[in-house]
Image (spheres, grey):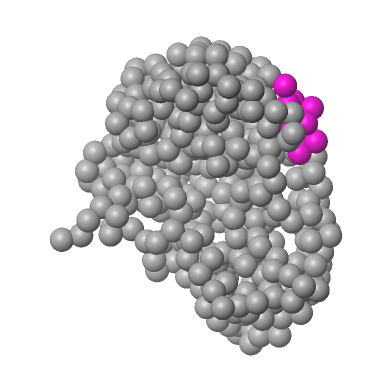
Amino acid sequence: MTTRTASTFAPPVMEARRWLDGVSHPADRPLINVSQAAPVDPPPAPLRAAMAEALELTETHLYGPVLGLPELRAELAVQWCAHYGGAVAADEVAITAGCNQAFAAVITALCTEGDEVILPTPWYFNHKMWLDMAGVRAVPLSTGPDLLPDAAAARALVTPRTRAIALVTPNNPGGVEYPAATLRAFADLAAETGLRLIVDETYRDFDSRAAPPHDLLRDGVGAPLIQLYSFSKAYRLTGHRVGAVIAEAPLLAEIEKFLDTVAICAPQLGQRAALWGLQNLGPWLAGERAEILDRRAAIAENMPKLEAQGWRLLGVGAYFAYLQHPFADSAADLAPRLVREAGVLALPGTMFMPAGDDRGARQFRIAFANVDRTGIGALFDRLAALDWPLASPDRPA
């Protein structure tokens, strides 16, 4: 018998960390870790001070409302309205223990055994893992060279068992920012077919566009739209596990059942930190965004080094660059070699693709959340210096 957890693969980031076992790197050539999109710096000092004050409150150490602190739900609703130009009420916001839990809660509320959810590939592996463990079939939607999904292609995948389409923008792992027209086409498809459209906007705060990235909230919250968000990246709260779901209130009532059973409530300290951040860290977050956008620019500026060696940049944005390598061997085999021979820890594209999709063998994800402009230059120098056997010119990309 196959258990729920045995139905899926091992956590990719943990697998990649095992490649470091027994490998040492000299002080003058330290490891460049671009495997995980999580900031390693602590929250800014003013936020840490506010968290210290929150620790003195009795309610910080108690269970809170299952759907989150009312003040946090209300503040996020206000800021969501301002950002997207749509109407969002506090009772259309739920706070979760991280955005992964938000996705799990939504899928549990929407799906049952044997149902289907359409995921563009390359996909975010934790989405695929949860669908596996929930007994829900992940239906891969292949993207083109620009890594953008096509609503017409998705329409051909819809069956009587399809319940939702899940998109991530800015994308993990590809980095691409989905155009407003792309998102509108998927929203129209979901409305026409009776599906839900899940839009994971974990990296929303680092989108390069000044204007709202889409108009999906122009008619307010309601079917088919479900939005997911994370405070982890914006305020460096990864260890405090705070995410959110924005959806119609009847669906949140179903999600409440899941949250109450799994964690009862998101951590109180993290929620209070997220609230303080929303209310006080706007200018600081703008600076963080500017830094990430500068790193994105550094990726583009350094690409000629790799292009001369046959590499291609498939997508870049938020915390990610998605690269196609020129070598004969699979990225799955080359990734551990990168650790040993180049001092680079990166995830191969095979971790973001379904079995049998050979495109992943030619791809790597570079997560540059913790690598500054200088580090990006060093990373590209190391990749450009690789002298490995090349793939034949007629091998498909």
Residue at the image position 75 percent from the left and 67 percent from the top: 379
Quadrant (top left/top right/bottom left/bottom right) for the C terminus = bottom right
| Residue 283 belongs to magenta span | yes
Q: Is residue 380 left or right of residue 276?
A: right
x%, y% of residue 94?
45, 23
Q: Residue furthest left?
A: 1
Please say if 338 is above or below 234.
Answer: below
Question: For the stretch drawn in magenta, what is the main secondary structure?
Answer: helix
Q: Is residue 393 left or right of residue 229?
A: right
Quadrant (top left/top right/bottom left/bottom right) for the N terminus = bottom left
Residue 57 visible in this rendered orientation of the protein: yes
Please say if 180 is above or below 331.
Answer: above
What residue range appears in magenta? 280-288
Residue 199 visible in this rendered orientation of the protein: no
Picture quadrant of residue 190: top left
Please say if 53 is above or below 5.
Answer: above
x%, y% of residue 120?
47, 50
Q: Nearer the viewer, residue 287 or 365?
A: 287
Q: Nearer the viewer, residue 353 or 393?
A: 353
| Residue 28 belongs to magenta span | no
Q: Nearer the viewer, residue 318 or 354?
A: 318
Residue at the image position 52 percent from the left and 66 percent from the top: 16
x%, y% of residue 287?
80, 36
Residue at the image position 59 percent from the left and 16 percent from the top: 75
Q: Is residue 193 left or right of residue 141?
A: left
Residue at the image position 37 percent from the left and 33 percent from the top: 263
Number of disc labels: 0
